[in-house]
Image: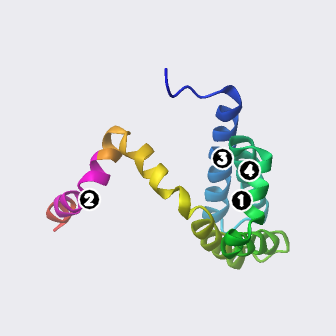
């Protein structure tokens, strides 16, 4: 197969998944500092395993990515010093800017998922049907 995933990449994807789960639980449980910190550690280690440690380091330290990496790291610091709401907002803004170059690849991947692909291809049709059902 052309798209085989190595075991190491599967571990990286799993770590990112656990990071998203713990971050989600941390937000749901009134910005629990411990869960948010665990979610961040899992996500960062998952990105490191998935992309490679040197590529991850370059992602955060290249001058053109400072606009996203500085808010992300400041948000991570704020979570550790008990400012979770401000920290998670800064982290989300930094993540969007930092990983904005990956959105075309993510869109191609999501378009191959059966229901998600249809939603990405025909978003207005979906929202019109949803509006008709609710209204």
Say whether marks 4 and 1 touch (CB < 8 Å). Answer: yes
Closer-to-camera residue (124/65): 65
In this rendering, the answer to whether 95 lies above or below 53 is: below
Q: What residue is pinned by disc 4?
A: 55
Q: Is mark 1 on a helix, strand or loop?
A: helix
Q: What element carries label 4?
A: helix
Q: How far apart are marks 2 and 1 (CA)?
A: 32 Å
Q: What residue is pinned by disc 1?
A: 59
Place of residue 26 in the rendered image (x, y in percent of width and height, measured from the top left) = 67, 61
Q: Magenta segment: does it hold 25?
A: no
In the picture, residue 82 is in which quadrant? Answer: bottom right
In this rendering, the answer to whether 117 lies above or below 90 is: above
Q: Pick out the residue farthest to the front.
A: 63
Q: Distance between the residues labelled 4 and 2?
A: 34 Å
- Dot label at residue 16: 3
Closer-to-camera residue (39/93): 93
Q: Magenta segment: does it hold 120?
A: yes
Place of residue 45 in the rendered image (x, y in percent of width and height, measured from the top left) = 77, 48
Closer-to-camera residue (88/30): 88
> Of label 4 and label 3, which has the lower sequence position?
3
Is label 3 or label 1 in front? 1
**Colour scheme in use:** rainbow
Q: Distance between the residues labelled 3 and 1?
A: 16 Å
In this rendering, the answer to whether 2 lies above or below 34 is: above
- The magenta stretch is 118-129
- Dot label at residue 123: 2
Q: Residues within 10 Å of mark 1 (few under 14, many from 20)?
A: some
> Of label 2 and label 1, which has the lower sequence position?
1
């Amino acid at each position: 197969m052309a798209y085989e995933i190595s075991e190491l990449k599967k571990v990286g994807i799993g770590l990112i998944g656990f990071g998203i789960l713990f971050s989600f639980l941390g937000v749901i449980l009134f910005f629990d500092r411990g869960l948010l910190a665990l979610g961040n550690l899992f996500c960062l280690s998952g990105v490191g395993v998935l992309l490679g440690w040197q590529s991850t380091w370059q992602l955060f330290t290249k001058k053109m990515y400072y606009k996203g990496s500085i808010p992300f790291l400041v948000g991570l610091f704020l979570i550790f010093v008990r400012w979770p709401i401000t920290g998670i907002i800064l982290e989300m803004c930094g993540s969007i800017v930092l990983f904005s170059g990956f959105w075309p690849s993510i869109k191609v991947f999501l378009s191959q998922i059966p229901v998600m692909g249809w939603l990405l291809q025909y978003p207005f049709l979906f929202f019109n049907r949803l509006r008709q059902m609710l209204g």
